[in-house]
Amino acid sequence: MSDLRNSNPYDLKTKKDEGYLYEEKPSGYLTAKEFISFLNKKKILIDRVDNLPRFANNNNIIMAKKKRENKHGSTPTIYKIPTDSKIEEILQSHKNNNNSLIGRQLLEKKKKKILEIFDNASSAENYNKKIDESKTDKEKKVIMKIKWEKCESKTSIAKKVSAALKVNCNRKLVKSVLSKKRSSQLDKLLKIN
């Protein structure tokens, strides 16, 4: 049973190849609670302590084991404080991952922004009618040029959302949101696929 509690699934280094656990927390390391507090202050949202070793392992944050203070519970893991550039890299990664807490919040903002841009765009269908009614080629070209400037496509909406929120957005998300929320108005788009 003690082997199970002192298991080392991430093959964490203890003190210099001697195979024993740190007696005291070294400087530059934080306990699990301190590390979560540190990450939350840096706007990296983590709410569960039990996922912390996986999070640290996935983001290449150095971890170590510290000797337990009593006989009960598992061996505590301590975490090396990451650099500011590492924090920025993790933050950007979480913003672009729809399964992280930050990513889920941003996904809702993306959906709202997609609908806002779509609702404010001119209808391509109206311009198509004007093009059909126009009598000269020159008039058609002028109306077409205006149509391409004023109307939106799934790709252009995705680019505008990416620029506005400074996160990745793709046309698949735009298509999904518009199909669910504005399915009867899809003829507003420049191209319907």
Image: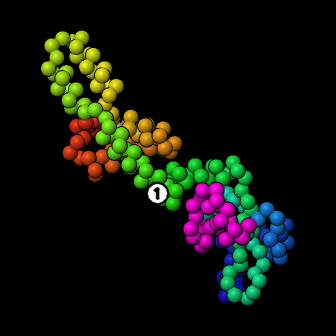
Residue designated by label 1: 104
> Relative to the observer, which residue lies in front, 148 or 112?
112
Q: Nearer the viewer, residue 165 or 87?
A: 165
Q: Which residues are magenta?
A: 30-54
The secondary structure that most of the magenta stretch takes on is helix
Q: Position of residue 141 (x, y in %)?
A: 26, 16
Image quadrant where residue 33 sits: bottom right
Q: Position of residue 152 (x, y in %)?
A: 33, 33
Quarter of the view holding residue 58: bottom right
> In the picture shown, does residue 172 fall above or below 31?
above
Q: How many marks?
A: 1
**Along the line of sight, which residue is nearer the eye, 125 or 74?**
125
**Residue type pointed to by label 1:** Arg
> From the image, which quarter does the N terminus lie in?
bottom right
Q: Based on the picture, tell me whether residue 41 belongs to the magenta stretch.
A: yes
Check if residue 35 falls in the magenta segment: yes
Can residue 86 be seen by looking at this rendering?
Answer: yes
Q: Is residue 129 left or right of residue 79?
A: left
Q: Is residue 12 visible?
A: no
**Label 1 packing within 10 angstroms: few (<14), some (14-19), many (20+):** some
Q: Is residue 181 above or below residue 162?
A: below
Secondary structure beneath label 1: helix
Please report the residue visible at 17 percent of the width from the left and 26 percent of the height from the top.
129
Give the side of residue 151 with respect to residue 45, left or right.
left
Residue under the image location 69 percent in, 48 percent down: 85
